Image (cartoon, rainbow, N blue to C red):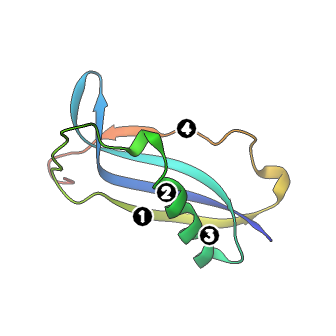
Amino acid sequence: MPWFRCLICGENFPGQIVGESGPVGFYVTRFVEASDPTDAEAVAILALRTEPSLAPAPGWMPAGQSRVFFEEIEEVTAERVPAVPPGFAWHPMDDAEA
């Protein structure tokens, strides 16, 4: 089964940046094994649901609907799949984005 590199953007997730709690956005790349790009998107979403970094803190009250977008899904060779998944790149949500 082929591998896919998924560039994912998230919005309105609970988080903390420089000691300030609030909604944050992120970019992350995930590599998944799937039959085609549509299946790769589904597999990546299921994997994100188990990411401890995306779990809300106790008592978190959402400021908006959390969502993810796939900016790119590209088939890659198995040799390009890293042994350790890349980390998240967090950013604060602007008022216009939230």
Q: Which residue is mark 3?
A: 40
Which residue is the site of mark 1? Answer: 69
| Mark toward the start of the polypeptide (3 vs 2) | 2
Dot 4 lies on which element?
Answer: loop
Label 1: few (<14), some or many (≥20) within 10 Å? few
Percent position of residue 88, x then y? 49, 40
| Labels 3 and 2 touching (C-beta < 8 A) | no
* Identity, as a three-letter code, of the amino acid under mark 1: Phe
Can you identify the residue that label 4 sits on? Answer: 87
Give the CA separation, mark 3 to mark 4: 19 Å
Answer above or below: position of 83 versus 66. above
The residue shown at (29%, 57%) is 66
Q: Residue at x 49, y 51 (%)?
A: 50
Residue found at x 67% / y 60%:
32
Disc 2 marks which residue? Answer: 8
82 displayed left or right of 9 = right
- In three-dimensional space, the C-alpha distance between marks 1 and 4, rounded to whole angstroms, equals 17 Å
Q: Residue 84 falls in which quadrant of the image?
A: top right
